[in-house]
Image (cartoon, grey):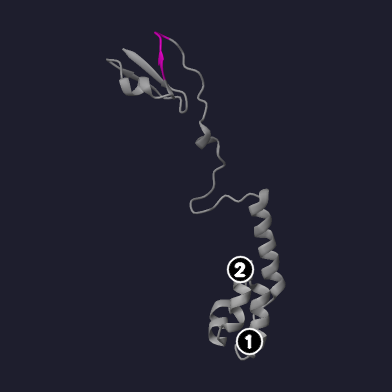
Amino acid sequence: MIRYHNKNTGDVVERKHADSRLDMLPNWERLDGDETPEAPTPDSVLKRPQTAPGTALTSTDGPRAAAEEEYKEQQEDAGDPPDRSASKETWVEYALKRAVSDEERAEIPSLTKPVLIAKYGESPVA
C-alpha cells in the first residue's frame, strides 16, 4: 500500500498503486512505511479571516478605506433630503452636497426636479 498525506488538511489516503495525480499535486506527499505525517499547514486560502456568507471583508487600512470614510462623512454632512415640495434650487443645492465627482456636479443643474428627487431623495446610507 502507498500512503499519501495532504499537507493542507492532514488527510491520509492509501492506494494500491502509485497515484500520478497525487504525486503531481504540491500539497500531497508520499509517506514511507509507518511514517507519521506532519501537522497540517493551511494554505493561504485557509489563513484568510472568515466572515458570514454574503458579508464583505472590509479593511480599516489603505486608500480605499480612507476614501470610503471620506464618502460616508460627505454624505452625512449633506444632511437629510429636502421636502419633495421644496424648490428645484433647494434640490440642486442638496444634490451638489451629495455629488461625488466633478462630472456629477456639472450635470446636476441640468436635471429636472423629479430626476433630482429620484436620484437624491433617499437619505444617505450610513
Given the image, on which type of amino acid does mark 2 rest?
Answer: Val
Given the image, on which type of amino acid does mark 1 rest?
Answer: Asp
Residue under numbered circle 2: 125
Question: Picture quarter containing residue 91?
Answer: bottom right
Q: Residues within 10 Å of mark 1 (few under 14, many from 20)?
A: few
Residue for point 63% across, 49% down? 59
Q: What label sits on residue 83 in the rendered view?
A: 1
Residue for point 33% across, 18% down? 14
Disc 1 is placed on an element classified as loop
Residue at the farthest left position: 16
Q: What label sits on residue 73 in the rendered view?
A: none
Where residue 82 sits in the image (x, y, percent)? 65, 84
Question: Picture quarter containing residue 25?
Answer: top left
Magenta residues span 29-34
* Mark 2 / mark 1, whichever is N-terminal: 1
Residue for point 53% across, 80% down? 118
